[in-house]
Image (spheres, grey):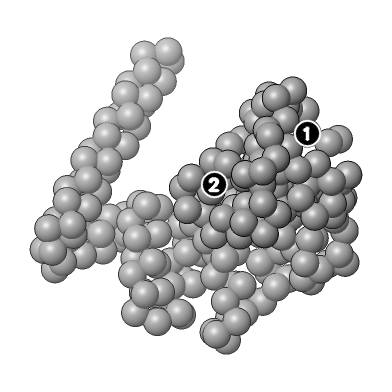
Amino acid sequence: MKKILTLLLFICIFSISIQADTLSKAKSLWQNKQYKAALKIYQKEAKNDNPKALYFLARLYYQKRNFALAEKYLKKASSLGYLKARYNLGVFYQNKSTKYFDLKKSFDIFYALATKDKYASAQNRIGLFLQHGVYVQTDYKLAVKWYEKSAKQGDVDAECNLAFMYASGKGVFPNFGRAHNFAKRGYAQGQEICRKVWKQYNLKNFPEDKSFKIGFFKPID
């Protein structure tokens, strides 16, 4: 029995390795503008229920504004446990320019990812819902809680949102030194919110909070 389980595990790992090599080849072909050859590989892998191939096709159809197929492939990849596809399905439902716009579906997807899977980007999205009062009641303190959970995992968007909260005093006591801490990385990377907060609140004129280290802080419970 042990030998059989070992053999099955080896076959599984070998199969995953082959799939990874195949998708790597397809990606290389696509980058070299050999679109037909690349697309053929992606479509074949999608038929074999490869979630990454399904996700690629979803993105492609979205760019072509074929939203029906984009949703179909995102949902299929999501059902296979691909968290990135599930997250982007939530983003998909936030697009007001399509008939698929549905804030309830979007929120439910993000909330499940944020709580069950501890998915940092989804935690940040929940914070945005709460900060701006979209679909749910505005709650700055709870928004800060979710931003902190996300920032704890290194999500730069959450760091920028926390920089705004600390600079504006929404949900927390104003602390420009801490806002400086949270905005610095995103500002250097050109992140829009961080750059806006940095300039609006003149954070360069406030010293960093040396007692506070991002990544080591304790999120609000």
Q: Amino acid at mark 1?
A: Pro
Measured in 3D between alpha carbons, the distance from the residue under mark 1 to the one under mark 2, in whole angstroms, is 20 Å
For mark 1, give the secondary structure: loop
10 Å crowding of disc 1: few (<14), some (14-19), many (20+): some
Q: Residue at x 53, y 48 (%)?
A: 187
Q: Residue at x 13, y 64 (%)?
A: 33
The quadrant in which the N terminus is found is top left
- Residue 106 position in % (x across, y down): 66, 66
Mark carried by residue 186: 2
- Residue 219 position in % (x across, y down): 78, 33
The one of 36 and 134 positioned closer to us in this rendering: 134
For mark 2, give the secondary structure: helix
Q: Nearer the viewer, mark 1 or mark 2?
A: 2
Q: Which residue is mark 1?
A: 219
Asked if one can make out residue 106 in the rendered structure from this viewpoint, the answer is yes
Q: Amino acid at mark 2?
A: Gly
| Location of residue 104 (image quadrant) | bottom right
Most extreme residue toward the front is 205
The one of 10 and 214 positioned closer to us in this rendering: 214
Q: Is residue 189 left or right of residue 145?
A: left
- Residue 59 position in % (x across, y down): 38, 66
Mark carried by residue 19: none
Badge count: 2
- Residue 128 position in % (x across, y down): 71, 60
10 Å crowding of disc 2: few (<14), some (14-19), many (20+): many
- Reading the chain from its start, which is encountered first: label 1 or label 2? 2
Q: Residue at x 33, y 70 (%)?
A: 60
Q: Residue at x 64, y 28 (%)?
A: 215
Label 1 with label 2: CB-CB less than 8 Å: no
The quadrant in which the C terminus is found is top right
The one of 51 and 142 positioned closer to us in this rendering: 142
